[in-house]
Image (cartoon, rainbow, N blue to C red):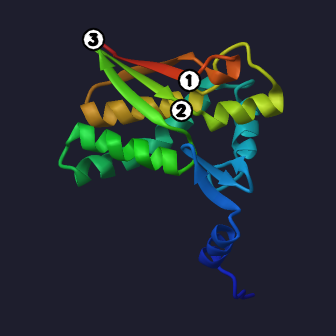
């Protein structure tokens, strides 16, 4: 079965009708934060899965970014700052929020603000009693491990889904 509307035509139509737009470091799909799917879909998966196995969400985030980090690192001949800048821009333009990295006394502090995942989580489940961004923590861990050739442990210390101002992560080298 063939159709005259392919993915590219559909995306163009959505753009022309302003049903996809980028505002304040968020990708909006029909005025809802998204990642080429409605963010509520991703948040519902995260919300349901974290009740069963937070570690698997962390691992999924880590696995999802591993190959991308190697590719980006090679594009910039191992220039960490250029690679992190590209990652931050790709993440923001994908609708996952704005990443800001801060290297501080052997630790890496990363903020995500806005955090469309945490915002969608609140819409679906209400405020959380604990951080929910295990997928993001795993992705960040993979970024730093891949870029800096050291093993890291990354933990979310503040989460917008808990009512904090932003999502904040600490990454530390494992000895």
Instruction: Answer whether labels 2 and 1 touch (C-beta < 8 Å).
Output: yes
Of residues 174 and 92, the one nearer the viewer is: 92
Q: Secondary structure at mark 3?
A: loop
Residue 9 % position (x, y) = 63, 78
What residue did someone put label 3 on? 105
Q: Residue at x 74, y 31 (%)?
A: 121
Which of pointers 3 and 2 lies earlier in the amino acid sequence?
3
Residue under the image location 25 percent in, 54 percent down: 75
Q: Give the side of residue 132 with respect to residue 66, left or right.
A: right
Q: Residues within 10 Å of mark 1 (few under 14, many from 20)?
A: many
Q: Secondary structure at mark 1?
A: strand
Marks 3/1 in contact by CB < 8 Å: the verdict is no
Residue 13, label in figure:
none
Circle 2 residue = 136
Q: Nearer the viewer, mark 3 or mark 2?
A: 3
Categorize mark 2 by other alpha carbons within 10 Å: few (<14), some (14-19), many (20+).
many
Label 1, on which residue? 167
Residue 87, picture quadrant: top left
**Can the viewer see residue 6 in this picture?**
yes
- Which of the two discs, 3 and 1, labels the residue nearer the N terminus? 3
Q: Nearer the viewer, residue 122 or 17?
A: 17
- In whole angstroms, how far apart are the C-alphas of marks 3 and 1? 20 Å
Residue 66 visible in image: no
């Amino acid at each position: 079965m063939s159709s005259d509307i392919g993915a590219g035509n559909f995306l163009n139509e959505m753009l022309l009708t302003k049903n996809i737009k980028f505002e304040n470091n968020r990708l909006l799909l029909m005025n809802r934060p998204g990642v080429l799917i409605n963010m509520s879909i991703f948040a519902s998966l995260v919300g349901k899965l974290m009740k069963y196995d937070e570690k698997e969400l962390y691992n999924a985030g880590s696995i999802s970014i591993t190959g991308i980090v190697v590719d980006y690192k090679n594009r910039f001949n191992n220039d960490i700052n250029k690679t992190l800048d590209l990652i931050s821009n790709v993440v923001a333009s994908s609708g996952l929020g704005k990443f800001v990295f801060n290297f501080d006394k052997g630790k890496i502090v990363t903020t995500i603000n806005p955090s469309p995942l945490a915002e969608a989580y609140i819409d679906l489940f209400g405020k959380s009693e604990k951080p929910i961004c295990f997928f993001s923590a795993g992705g960040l861990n993979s970024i730093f491990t891949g870029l800096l050739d050291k093993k890291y442990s990354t933990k979310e210390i503040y989460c917008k889904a808990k009512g904090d101002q932003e999502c904040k992560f600490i990454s530390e080298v494992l000895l």
